[in-house]
Amino acid sequence: MIQGLYWVWYTIGAVLMLTIGVPDVLSFSNGLFLIFYALYVLDLIYKGRYRTGMSDRSVIWKESSLWLASFIIWLGGMGIEWLGVHTEWPFGEYAYSDYFGIHLFNVPVTLGFAWIAVVGNSAILSGGGSTWSGKLIRAVKTGFWAIVLDLVLDPVAHARGFWHWGAGGGFYGVPWSNYVSWFIMGAFLSLFLPAMPGDRSTLLRAKWLYQLFILLFGVLALKEGITGSFVIALAGVLLAEGSWLYDSRRKVQIV
């Protein structure tokens, strides 16, 4: 259900953002989009782990590791955002608008869900994570997918007033320290996630989710004249496709 709801929300939002913009009366939908994205990712992980025998779906608390990891990522994301907004470290000087809803200490509460979505989606693409060495390898890959996404997302968000950067410079007004921090935080927070599902269906859906998210913001970047982010979006789509083609998990068919 959440997956279908997400795609309905995505389609309506994409049409509005690419044409007339999101009307003020629908401004609440921006924060909900981040929540739906996070729930979609968690649903993918949970159902995928059930299909591949990693959990018992009949006893939901046996997946406590996933829910605990989600809470830690939400808390860690909110914490680092609070630090960034109030100290300008580690991302740089920035401030959030009211675009994403209610703020907690000057940080939209929905940003914690954004971290769950990005880290979780990137972790599924990266795979592995059943051992500490596997988690470390997955962390590096997760950081990579997160930074590719942010190179597309952040310049567009800055240009459209979702949040505001103060110092300028960097990549289309966003300091390079922000991208480095996204890589580090994405990699670090992924360490709290359990092993990712190893079936074709989960990986395929996660790939589409990632590709269509960055493609939307890539087109928005082109509309804003941010050619570099548009090119990176296309590269990210192709890299995700290439990763899918060479991933052994795509051969695992589970009913």
Image (tube, rainbow, N blue to C red):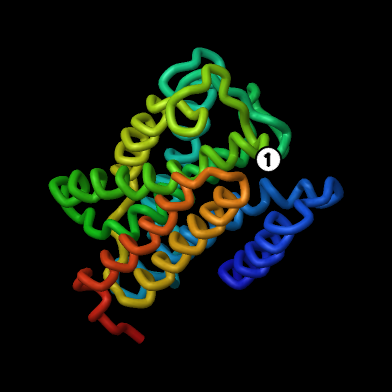
224 sits to left or right of 147: right
CA neighbours of label 1 inside 10 A, class few (<14), some (14 to 19), many (20+): many
Residue beneath the point at 57% across and 42% down: 156
Q: Nearer the viewer, residue 237 or 71?
A: 237
Q: Nearer the viewer, residue 189 or 25?
A: 25
The quarter in which the C terminus is drawn is: bottom left
Secondary structure category for the residue under label 1: loop
At which x and y percent is residue 19? 74, 58
Residue type highlighted by circle 1: Phe
Residue beneath the point at 34% across and 67% down: 49
| Residue farthest toward the left in the current orientation of the protein | 133
At which x and y percent is residue 57? 42, 70
| Residue farthest toward the right in the current orientation of the protein | 25
Task: Examine the rendered structure and indicate whether residue 20 appears above or below residue 112.
Answer: below
Find residue 200 and report its image quarter: bottom left
175 sits to left or right of 7: left
At which x and y percent is residue 142? 31, 48
The quarter in which the N terminus is drawn is: bottom right
Q: Nearer the viewer, residue 232 or 33?
A: 232
7 sits to left or right of 101: left
Residue beneath the point at 67% across and 46% down: 31
Task: Examine the rendered structure and indicate whether residue 129 appears above or below residue 169.
Answer: below
| Residue farthest toward the top in the current orientation of the protein | 87
In the rendered image, which residue does mark 1 sit on?
100
Task: Examine the rendered structure and indicate whether residue 165 appears above or below residue 213.
Answer: above
| Residue farthest toward the bottom in the current orientation of the protein | 255
Task: Count the numbered circles shown.
Answer: 1
Find residue 62 and report its image quarter: bottom left
Residue beneath the point at 52% across and 28% down: 173
